[in-house]
Image (cartoon, rainbow, N blue to C red):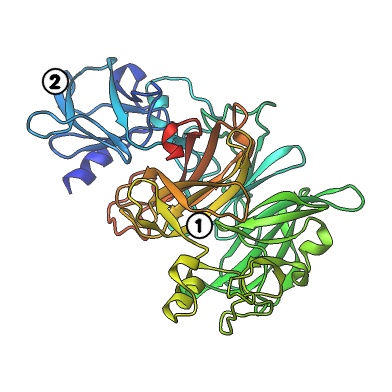
Amino acid sequence: MISSVCLLLTTITLGAQDSTEYFKITVVDEQTNRGVPLVELRTVNDCRYYTDSAGVVAFHEPGLMDKTVHFFVSSHGYEFPADRFGIRGTQLKVSPGGSATIRIKRNNIAERLYRVTGGGIYRDSELVGDEVPIAHPVLGAQVLGSDSVVNAKFQGRLYWFWGDTNRPSYPLGNFHVPGATTPLPGSQGVDPSRGVSLNYFIGDDGFAKETAHMPGKGPTWINGLVTLTDKQGNERMFAKYVKIKNSLTVYERGLAEFNNDEKVFEKRQQFDMQAPLYPYGHPFIHRDGDMEYVYFADPYPLVRVNANVESLQDLEQYETYSCLRQGSREKQLELDRDANGKLVYAWKKDTTPWTLQIQQELIKQGRLKEEEAYIHFEDSETGDTVLPSRGSVYWNDFRKKWVMIFVQFGGRSFLGEVWFAEADDLTGPWSKAVRIVTHDKYSFYNPKQHPFFAQEDGRFIYFEGTYTKTFSGNDHPTPRYDYNQIMYRLDLSDPRLSQ
């Protein structure tokens, strides 16, 4: 209860106090010397403050000003040194208009940069009068929280879309895909190392508008966002949509096309729910021989279709890379082996895609040996098995390999650990995984790479994910950060990635 009261006291309306009345605390990464977001500073009486996207806390606590105050310092994947009593914290003499810098060690290989969505992204920086890099640093389009992101280049800009989104006025918000645009990097956009300045599509009520309200009851979600050029030379953007009913059950799926004039997705094709293959995951376009394909990664890129508008709409044209016999279904699985008993992997149509669940079931039945498992990662440090969940794959020019960023199912933090893996070929073999981010008892699901943000020929890559207490078992959501997108940067020259 004390913590809740203290948090309430810190929610000061912008402009209610002069910036000189705050004591500015900046927490910086000792390796890069830039601010670290999502660092908790906790007082002895359990008042909690969290650094904004610049690593800043604007401190003004009646009764504590002009006094020496002890702050416990903690953050996911970062560490403050312990004193002789094992206490990780520091004392600061706080005073109006004063400032202090706290240096913190990063244990994560990837560097946390900023929050992309939600309210108060640069709240504390605004309170102390600092310049901020984005157009809406406190609240954009009344968005307080947003689920998983998909994005693509289209019509000379980057288009961003999210899942369910919270609003200030009521616990229920937008369940039909809000969207926004940003300039392409290098044109007029913000440096991706500093922020993403979103220009939301806004409804008449000022809240982020619904861009994909497909007919039928329940929320609409999209994924598989891809841009293709048709035979007439027109650039067109498509996404797979699903309709959701109770218990997160999908009862309809299909293909929608974005109407750029109206800023909405329009239904183009309803897919057969019994079809084994359909677009899902984060797509990329790649040429295999004489043919160009759209590959869908989730996180393995095991589904593809010819990269043209007609094929994208025709589920019979989709292929999956699999060792199942062509025509196999989830309830009728037949392994494809040659005369010597070796599994035959190939791109096959009309076949259910290979999944971790299918693999585990076949091993349980004794039809597949452990050493034959296609989906198999080992922790590069411990050799322990890593079970992959969602993620994405893109070619990286710096490593000259395919790079996968994925989240682990289970581990030290359920859906909170992020891994790096690479392969010479997009179908693998993928085997060694390096842990690059840990969130302590907090989920960070559906991580999405942003290849268009890559810098120095791909040495630095960017990815974001949904930071949420959901599924984590944590009953204490982080104020402002919970259920929002957080951006990370990974230096692919780090020798720890080559273990």
Q: Nearer the viewer, mark 1 or mark 2?
A: 1
Relative to 316, say whether 433 is above or below: above
Question: Where residue 144 appears, x then y in whole percent?
Answer: 46, 46
Q: Secondary structure at mark 2?
A: strand
Q: Identify residue for label 1.
A: 390
Q: Pointer 1 and pointer 2: residues touching (CB < 8 Å)?
A: no
Kindly indicate the quadrant of the structure image that contains residue 56.
top left
Question: Where residue 220 appears, x then y in whole percent?
Answer: 60, 64
Seen at 54% across and 29% down, the residue is: 134
Residue density around tag 1, few if under 14, some if 14–19, many if 20 or more, within 10 Å: many
Whether residue 262 is visible to the viewer of this picture, yes or no, is no
Seen at 46% across and 74% down, the residue is: 247
Seen at 16% across and 31% down, the residue is: 82
Q: CA distance from mark 1 to mark 2?
A: 48 Å
Q: Identify residue for label 2.
A: 67
> Which residue sits furthest front?
340
